[in-house]
């Protein structure tokens, strides 16, 4: 029997509709949620991603403030733009689109964003709050992945969750969120020995390694929930995940497609974080 396909596009629309209600309430109180996006250079993929966020903002009643800067913008000038947005009361969330040009220290820029406007959830204070189990603006991809599990009826508490990847953007935050929900968590990475032996134990397998179709049916447990965070472009231009979707869906219990799975949820959670930041600023 084939797996239940987790429709990230449909669930993201639900999330945006919910955020639109809250944003409308905030707007009625004179505090329309606002997202500022800083895009440096003309990277085509970044421009597409920014447009998708702008479209989601419109759907949710969030206003946008875009700043497009040339690729030769200095680090000092970019920091000035961040500082100005930090001090702008109309802006509740600041998003610096990555990657940045090589001459700019991305960590320095991201850590300059005010913690209460860090809607990507990359600020060390927000990550520290997540580590300690306190409410915070959490990284969007793992937050969206948790909502996909919840709204698809996948049980988490007491289950063995395996996370492939240990980045601060996805892997580590996802492991913390799963731990907070009482899963038993194993984190695997490039130095893990006998990876298939571990992944076959997973009730929940979250893949964020960036290797196209690396996970086949021989590496998963029958009936497992598979969350595929990977986005890889094949030689023919098509997108695929870290999981061999067509082969694995015949064995898994639940699975996210690529595209149309985690990606739309990442965008939706950026909007949810903006609305949450606006709520906090309103008190």
Image (cartoon, rainbow, N blue to C red):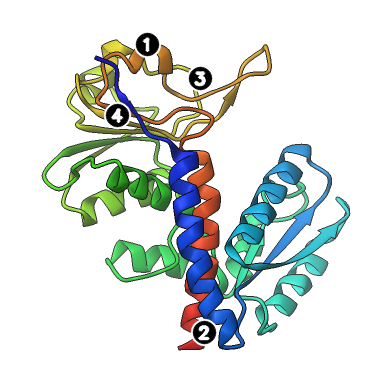
Tell me, yes or no, whether the two marked residues, 1 and 2, touch with CB atoms within 8 Å.
no
**Residue 61, above or below 226:** below
Residue 131 rendering spot, x and y as whole percentages: 31, 62
**Residue 166, above or below 22:** above
Q: Residue at x 40, y 36 (%)?
A: 165
User: Label 4: which residue?
Assistant: 254
Give the distance between the C-alpha atoms of the residues marked 1 and 2, in whole angstroms: 47 Å
Residue extending farthest to the left is 158
Give the distance between the C-alpha atoms of the residues marked 4 and 1, in whole angstroms: 13 Å
Q: Quadrant of the N terminus?
A: top left
User: Label 1: which residue?
Assistant: 247
Which numbered disc flags the more N-terminal residue, 3 or 2?
Answer: 3
**Residue 202, above or below 73:** above
Examine the image and state in which quarter residue 64 appears. bottom right
Does 266 sit left or right of 185 as displayed?
Answer: right
**Residue 244 in view in this figure:** no
Residue 220 rendering spot, x and y as whole percentages: 25, 19
**Residue 240 in view in this figure:** yes
Q: Which residue is drawn at 20% across and 21% down?
A: 221
Which numbered disc flags the more N-terminal residue, 1 or 2?
Answer: 1
**Which mark identifies residue 212?**
3
Tell me, yes or no, whether the two marked residues, 2 and 4, touch with CB atoms within 8 Å.
no
- Callout 4: helix, strand or loop? strand
Tell me, yes or no, whether the two marked residues, 3 and 2, touch with CB atoms within 8 Å.
no
> Observer-nearest residue: 233 or 258?
258
Residue 199 rendering spot, x and y as whole percentages: 25, 24
> Observer-nearest residue: 154 or 277?
154
Tell me, yes or no, whether the two marked residues, 3 and 4, touch with CB atoms within 8 Å.
no
**Which mark identifies residue 281?**
2
């Amino acid at each position: 029997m084939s797996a239940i396909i987790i429709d990230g596009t449909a669930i993201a629309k639900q999330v945006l509709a919910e955020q639109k209600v809250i944003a409308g309430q905030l707007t009625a109180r004179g505090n329309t949620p606002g997202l500022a996006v800083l895009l440096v250079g003309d990277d085509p993929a970044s421009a597409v991603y920014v447009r998708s966020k702008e479209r989601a903002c419109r759907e949710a009643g969030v206003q946008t403030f875009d700043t497009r800067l040339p690729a030769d913008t200095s680090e000092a000038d970019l920091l000035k733009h961040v500082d100005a947005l930090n001090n702008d009361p109309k802006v509740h969330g600041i998003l610096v689109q990555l990657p940045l040009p090589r001459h700019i220290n991305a960590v320095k820029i991201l850590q300059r964003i005010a913690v209460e406007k860090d809607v990507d959830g990359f600020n060390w204070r927000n990550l520290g709050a997540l580590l300690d189990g306190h409410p915070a603006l959490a990284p969007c991809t793992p937050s969206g992945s948790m909502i996909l599990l919840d709204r698809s009826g996948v049980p988490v508490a007491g289950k063995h969750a395996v996370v492939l990847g240990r980045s601060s953007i996805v892997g580590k935050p996802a492991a913390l969120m799963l731990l907070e929900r009482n899963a038993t968590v194993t984190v695997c990475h490039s130095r893990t020995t006998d990876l298939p032996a571990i992944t076959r134990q997973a009730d929940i397998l979250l893949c964020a390694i960036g290797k196209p179709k690396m996970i086949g049916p021989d590496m998963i447990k029958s009936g497992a929930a598979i969350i595929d965070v990977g986005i890889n472009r094949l030689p023919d231009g098509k997108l695929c995940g870290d999981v061999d979707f067509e082969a694995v869906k015949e064995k898994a219990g639940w699975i996210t497609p690529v595209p149309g799975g985690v990606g739309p949820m990442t965008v939706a959670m950026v909007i949810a974080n903006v609305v949450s930041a606006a709520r906090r600023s309103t008190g």
